Amino acid sequence: MSKTFTAIQIGVLALLSPLSFAYSPFVVKDIRVEGVQRTEAGTVFNYLPIRIGDSVSEDAVAKAIKALYATGFYRDVRIEVEKDVLVVIVDERPAIAQIAFSGNKEFDAKDLLKGLKEVGLAESRTFDRSQLEKAEQEIKRLYLTKSYYGAEVRTTVSPLERNRVAINFEVKEGQVARIKNIRIIGASAFKEDRLLGLMSLEESGGIFSWFRNAKYSKQQLLADIEELRSWYLDRGYLNFSIESTQVSITPDKQDVYVSLAINEGELYRIGSVKLAGELLVPEKELRALVTLKAGDVYSRAKVNDVTRAIADRLGNDGYAFANVNAVPELDEANRTVSLTLFVDPARRAYVNRINVVGNNKTREEVVRREMLQMESAWFDRASVDKSKQRIDRTGFFQDVSIDTVPVTDAADQVDLNVNVKERSTGSLSLGLGYSATDKLGLMASISQNNLFGSGNALSLAVNTGKVNRTASLSYDNPYWTVDGVSRGFDIYERKTDTDSLSVGRYASDAKGGGVRFGVPIGLDQRIHLGVSVDNTVTTVYDDSPQQYKDFVKQFGEDNTTLAWTAGWSSDKRDSYLYPVRGLYQKVNMEIATPPAEMQYVKFTYQLKDYVPVSTDSSLMLSTDFGYSTGYGGKPVPFYKYYYAGGIGTIRGYKDNSLGAKVTDENGNETGDTLGGTKRWVNTAELFFPMPGVKEKDRSMRLSVFFDAGVLWGVSGAHFGAQEMRYSTGLGFQWMSPIGPLKFSLGFPIKPKSGDETQRFQFMIGAVN
């Protein structure tokens, strides 16, 4: 008896009478597999539902063929019966040996392979020609997300030895479809141009066409619609709606037209605001947090601010899950909204555990010592928020967040997960460096602001610049004592030659060192104390200013300074690296006293106030005032003078070029400056994100600035409006892998005769 069954015949059998191929069941004495090339015979046995010794009928054979065919490994399956021996003959599908792409520029091959894998096509898998169309559609879908609407894909399948195939996808990307026109129909309360300015999507065309976000994206359009909705809801238009959205593309698939039809609705104002629910905090105290008043234009953003403020206030008393819902009641006739703020404090909770996550290098204690919220204490929202600020101000982390997580089976407990993302806090460099001041020089430095993850800072640097040649060693321990008293040491040797600068010529060789302490007197305030010894040997030349020569003649070339410092600082900024809000102030007094030769007093005051303008931009207002004077019949040493001009003071003017000018023997100005014993510099600077950079990436910021300052106190220079210098321009800050970088393009405003200007300037290693 010999019969043959194929996968095709199985479908026919279902239509025929069961007696068409009927034969008596038999017992399988052996099973033989034929046709395998890539796979093993064991694979067939694994999926075959028949075993030796089974009694088999035609139905069992049909089910076996279906089972093997369903694996997808085989193009065809046949089963023959030869004298109680079951012969399984398979025709294997080829395996995919390789997948290659050509013509793809917008996407890397690995991104395309990832997309193909999601539709079942990948190397080493069994090849199924029916999957090719899905693969081509997936590639086109990926290109559609990048606005390549004309992308074409052609597939070539090449057979290889050992029943394998190579697949090549040839991609013709075409051109990116750009938005030709965006229309907003139905706007009357606000101009269409104002509404278009809210959208991230932009029209192409114009001088800066390729810098615009003119590529159409459905996801971005949805985000822009929500931005428009928020804009109207924040300005009282509660019934605002999008009537229709139309997106069309030209036949050549190059231009996209977007049209939004909106219904603004009517303007609503606040009618009344009531508090309801469980008011565990005195209502008078909660009322003070309600900034909404009757008659004000309704604003969803302001309502959210009020509910958040009330919830945070309850959080200060341990109610970690307090919830405040604003329920509006509309009066259509009077166009007013009556708000009821329902307060649900939920349960009071205390902190079970504080978990630090993401600190791969930084020791956990470095994070924990900045926490004001303690374990086993009642949850305090204000302490948690302040702890986040303190951790961020260490400068060790790129991002900090604190999550409140309920504890399972403990309704009155929460865990705090402190999530940190570490940033590079150390650098090692050896090579040539260039700066606007020092020009070309050899630099070698090693610095680590988070030494071995301890939070301590160590810096060793050697610089052989044209102006400054420095070797220095600095060490700081911010927690010398457990209660936050800091201690630092400095040792240095610094040689200066001002020949290439815009200041009076002299050379100096200074060696010194000191110790300093910081004592906390509050959460944001510290007292600073220190003492240092400096020995400076100065050299003057024939063309040096007469004031410098007179100083050396009277006090000699070799002078020692014993300086005592005392100061106070307050830092209430929300971030050390990327401040958006908060006030920073610092006062410092330096007094040089006997038995050393020099005797002078230097006073400095710095203020920086960051005022948020929007969620991601901030206005910084700063002032820097310096005053110095000698006592005991001795002047301030000229090498301790203040200077002005350059990226650190008044941008747009050459470094250290402002102030009283040096005169020669004939009374003519040489162009060099003397410096001054008093300085006042003010800045207003608007910071905003770098266009095109990811939303959460704060490492790059642009700014628009206005600087104003004056330097006086020597050679008849006096404080006054005539001596003030002004500039404006653009700035760029980048927290780069090699350290903080600052660039500026400054434009002096009405510079005086003799002023030296310098439009482009930069600085390395300065923060804020």
Image (tube, grey):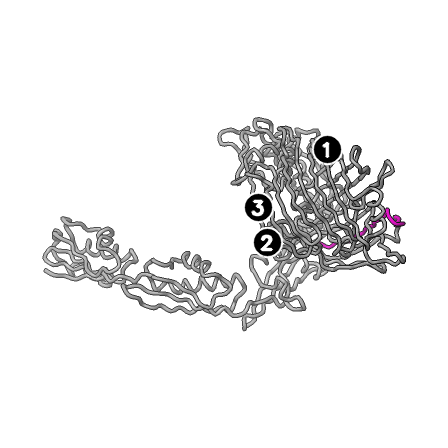
Q: Nearer the viewer, mark 3 or mark 2?
A: 2
Q: Which residue is mark 1?
A: 529
Residue 230 seen: no
The residue type indicated by label 2 comes to: Gly
**Which mark is drawn over residue 754?**
none
Q: Of the residues under marks 3 and 1, which one precedes in the sequence? A: 3
Magenta region includes residue 273: no
The residue type indicated by label 1 comes to: Leu
Q: Could you tell me which secondary element the residue under label 2 belongs to?
A: strand
Q: Would you call the spot at circle 1 few (<14 residues within 10 Å), some (14-19), or many (20 or more)?
A: some
Q: Which residue is mark 2?
A: 431
The answer to the question of whether label 3 and label 1 lie on touching residues, with beta carbons closer than 8 A, is: no
Query: Of 97 and 225, which appears nearest the observer?
Result: 97
Q: Nearer the viewer, mark 3 or mark 1?
A: 1
* Residue 297: x %, y % from top left: 74, 47
Q: Nearer the viewer, mark 1 or mark 2?
A: 2
Q: Which residue is mark 3?
A: 424
Q: Of the residues under marks 3 and 2, which one precedes in the sequence? A: 3
Query: Of 408 and 438, which appears nearest the observer?
Result: 438
Query: On the picture, is 341 further left or further right than 27?
Result: right
The residue type indicated by label 3 comes to: Ser
Q: Would you call the spot at circle 2 few (<14 residues within 10 Å), some (14-19), or many (20 or more)?
A: few
153 shown above or below 455: below
Tell me the distance, in whole angstroms, between the alpha carbons under discs 1 and 2.
Answer: 36 Å
Q: Could you tell me which secondary element the residue under label 3 belongs to?
A: loop
477 shown above or below 205: above
User: What is the tally of numbered marks visible in this picture?
Assistant: 3
Q: Would you call the spot at circle 3 few (<14 residues within 10 Å), some (14-19), or many (20 or more)?
A: some
Q: Residue furthest top?
A: 376
Q: Which residues are magenta?
A: 703-718
* Residue 529: x %, y % from top left: 72, 33
494 shown above or below 257: above
